[in-house]
Amino acid sequence: MVRMLAFLGLALMAGPARAESSPEALTYLSCRACHADATAATAIPPIEGRPAAELVEAMTRMGQSAGDTTIMHRFVKALSPAEIEALATYVSGLEGAAQ
Amino acid sequence: MNRFNRREAIALTSAFAGGLLAAPAIASGSAKVVVVGGGFGGVAAARELKAIDQAIEVTLVVEGESYSTCPFSNLVIAGERPMSAITFGYESLAAQGVIIRQGLAERIDGERRVVVLEGGDELPFDRAIVSPGIALKFDAVPGYDEAAAEIMPHAWKAGPQTELLRDKLAAMREGGTFLMAVPDNPYRCPPGPYERASLVAHYLSRNNPTAKIIIVDGKDSFSKQALFEQAWAERYPGMIRHVPFAESGGVLGVDPTTLEIETPFETFVGDVVNFIPPQRAAAVAIASGLTGSGEWCQIDQATFESEIVPGVHVLGDAAIVGDMPKSGFSASVQGNVCAHVVAALLRSEAPPQGVLLNTCYSLIAPDYGISVAGVYRVNGEGLLKSVEGSGGNSPLEVADGFRQAEADYAVSWYETLTGRLFG
């Protein structure tokens, strides 16, 4: 359901997606304090426009085991699988990396 | 609530897709929002409001032509960065359509819905967002007033005070004592004083290695304490002495003529004194009645709206925002979310909600970073609470490269966030 709605959203809009007020869009306002646009050469990797499946896999993995992750696991532990999926779908739809 | 918001978002999407993009000012066309405060919270709110709806008239009241950030100001004190590297102008906000109004906001009149500026000019608003930061209490510690701050700088608002402390550190005699006083909670940037001690130690270890640092603390424990103490023992053995409240009994007074800090059990003398006084919400918050009988603004933690003055939203260091700490990161996140809340309320829609994050990086040295992170959600009682089982500090035991990575991430965070706000 979440995926379908998000897909619908993506299909309908291209530009103004970042300023929508869905829960995942509001949550992403925190993510983007650290994760820059894809054009930036920063130590923290850009995430906008990355495939949703890749983002879900990365967040799920970090939530289960910190490994050498410094900080993301501390955030992911607060999110439900549905929230991770909605957030990943939203972020993947933003203009960012050329994939 | 989630479903409602998602449906709303989709409805809005459909409206855009249906060709209404040319007239996005559906209900908020003539809405006026005045944002008070040119720091992390105010700038984030103003910029996000314009991103949500260009038709909202957004005026940002700022004190000066530029803003120097408290984050990374400890690097300036330690001589690692110039002041210009932490100072930003408001040109890009103006380019986004934000009206920049330079001046001092004296009072927010919630009844008449105007912000009153020094000199008497009034800025009308439908809703106001207030993120004015802190005021230093110059009446709390005997001997410590604004004149004393020129001799014993606080450097707790970035700017000339930062440069003053940097210059005093650089001129300190060989083997001298850098004496710090840190207040009890709550104050701006809980780990900030200990990052400062670390970076001053980094400077001294290279330039004045027999010098000492003494921290006279107004509390017994502090943010990321185990990590700081581990790092101090490793990087600066014997250089930093932390005096907890229980050991000194707290500051009774200061004497700027002798550079002394007096406590019940010991009188401390510094060659350079960095006195960080107790704090409260900025003057405009108190003059506007936003703090009630207290020193910090009381707000609805889901909407940031004042519990005392309707139509006025308060965030950042001046407010008690649930469990979130007083940090630039927190203020910017709150400013962003508050913009969405205000935009929704202007359209007579239910205020949206999301998850809020905070990260405070502290640098022990330019190649050694530690962090504390938090995740916050509004609970069933409307309180913004830290989510159990999430957040927390960097680990004490780490593999090679971990501290370096966190230092790199601290720089990355700073560049990204200041770029998003001011770039």
Image: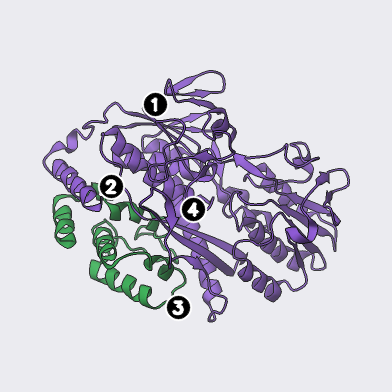
Badge 3: residue crowd in 10 Å (few <14, some 14–19, many ≥20):
few
- Expressed as whole percent of the image width and height from the top left, the position of residue B155 reads 68, 47
Q: Amino acid at mark 2?
A: Ser
Which residue carries the number 4 mark?
B324
Q: Are marks 4 and 2 in contact (CB under 8 Å)?
A: no
Residue contact between numbered discs 1 and 2, judged by CB atoms under 8 Å: no
Mark 4–mark 2 distance (CA, rounded to whole Å): 21 Å
- Name the residue beneath numbered marker 2: A21
| Residue B227 position in % (x across, y down) | 61, 70
Q: Are the residues flagged by discs 2 and 3 in contact, CB closer than 8 Å?
A: no
Image colour for chain B is purple
What subunit carries mark 3?
A: A
Q: Secondary structure at mark 2?
A: loop
Mark 4 or mark 1, earlier in chain: 1
Q: Nearer the viewer, mark 1 or mark 3?
A: 1
Query: Is there one chain holding both mark 2 and mark 3?
Result: yes
Task: Say which element carries label 3.
Answer: loop
Mark 3 residue type: Asp
Residue for badge 1? B125
* Colour scheme in use: by chain
4 vs 2, front mark: 4
Q: Quadrant of residue B236?
A: bottom right
Query: Front-most of B118 and B68?
Result: B118
Disc assigned to residue A68: 3
Q: Helix or strand or loop: what does disc 4 sit on?
A: loop
| Amino acid carrying mark 4 in the image | Met
Residue B190, by quadrant, is: bottom right
State the residue in front, B172 or A67.
A67
Report the Cα–Cα distance between label 4 and label 1. Answer: 28 Å
Image-based side of B230 in relation to B422, left or right: right
